[in-house]
């Protein structure tokens, strides 16, 4: 990973709920490199930071919003005493639906709404945010859809390193005032959305 963002996690316990992919693997490696410890097994018990990893490719099932919400809420209840962070890794279609993928768009939007509800319920002790990924490549598309690139003002797919930096922003202890937000790492796709999508 080149030019990785540096944060000081001071031994924070990191847990993962959901699927793994190239972005998740790189995020976990970066968190470990910045002083975090990955918790295996029961992620909700000892976590200071919970990553909720949702499917990132339109055309797949985004996940059961109720189940993801329930898992994240259970983790938040266990974090209440000491505080913590929950970061949803989600598709950018959570904030801007794709006509060709209505079910995935709806499921992703429901997950985003659940994230915001958790932010309202558990603030200020727990910060709950999301990173919404557009087209991200790591040799092949790992997030989003190639068709997104025709409406991406940056004119290219994002890199895994760029995706990781956004997640690190939400995990950084210095970021203490952001909650209930989705940071779109989509090259401006949501801003450049077109009718033929």
Image (tube, grey):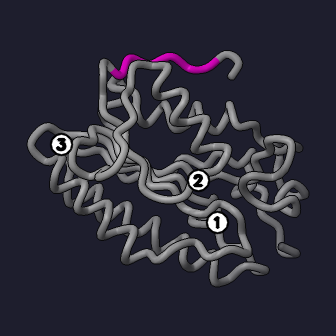
- Label 3: which residue? 125
Label 2, on which residue? 132
Residue behind mark 1: 93
Left or right of 144? Residue 55 is left
Q: Quadrant of residue 174?
A: top left
Give percent across and percent down for residue 136. 75, 47
Of helix, strand and loop, which one carries label 1?
helix
- Above or below for 88 versus 2: below
Q: Earlier in the sequence, mark 2 or mark 3?
A: 3
Q: Is residue 50 magenta?
A: no
Give me the C-alpha separation between circle 3 and circle 1: 28 Å
Image quarter in which the C terminus is found: bottom right
Of 10 and 116, the residue lying toward us: 10
Q: Residues within 10 Å of mark 3 (few under 14, many from 20)?
A: some
The structure residue drawn at horizontal position 50% and vertical position 16%, both measured from the top left corner, is 6
* Kind of element beneath mark 2: strand
- Taking the image as drawn, is residue 190 in sight? yes
Mark 3 and mark 1 in contact? Answer it, CB < 8 Å.
Answer: no
Q: Which residues are magenta?
A: 4-9
């Amino acid at each position: 990973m080149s030019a990785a963002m540096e944060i000081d996690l001071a031994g924070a316990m990191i847990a993962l709920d959901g699927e793994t992919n190239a972005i998740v693997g790189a995020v976990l490696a970066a968190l470990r490199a910045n002083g975090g410890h990955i918790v295996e097994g029961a992620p909700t018990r000892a976590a200071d930071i919970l990553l909720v990893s949702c499917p990132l490719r339109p055309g797949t099932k985004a996940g059961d919003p109720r189940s993801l919400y329930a898992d994240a809420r259970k983790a938040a209840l266990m974090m209440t005493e000491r505080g913590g962070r929950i970061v949803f890794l989600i598709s950018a279609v959570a904030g801007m639906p794709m006509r060709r993928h209505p079910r995935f768009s709806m499921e992703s939007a429901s997950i985003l709404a659940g994230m915001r509800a958790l932010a309202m319920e558990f603030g200020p002790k727990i910060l709950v945010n999301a990173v919404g990924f557009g087209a991200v490549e790591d040799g092949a598309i790992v997030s989003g859809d190639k068709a997104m690139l025709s409406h991406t003002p940056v004119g290219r797919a994002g890199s895994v390193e760029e995706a990781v930096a956004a997640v690190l922003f939400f995990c950084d202890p210095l970021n203490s005032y952001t909650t209930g937000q989705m940071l779109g790492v989509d090259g401006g796709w949501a801003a450049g959305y077109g009718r033929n999508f």
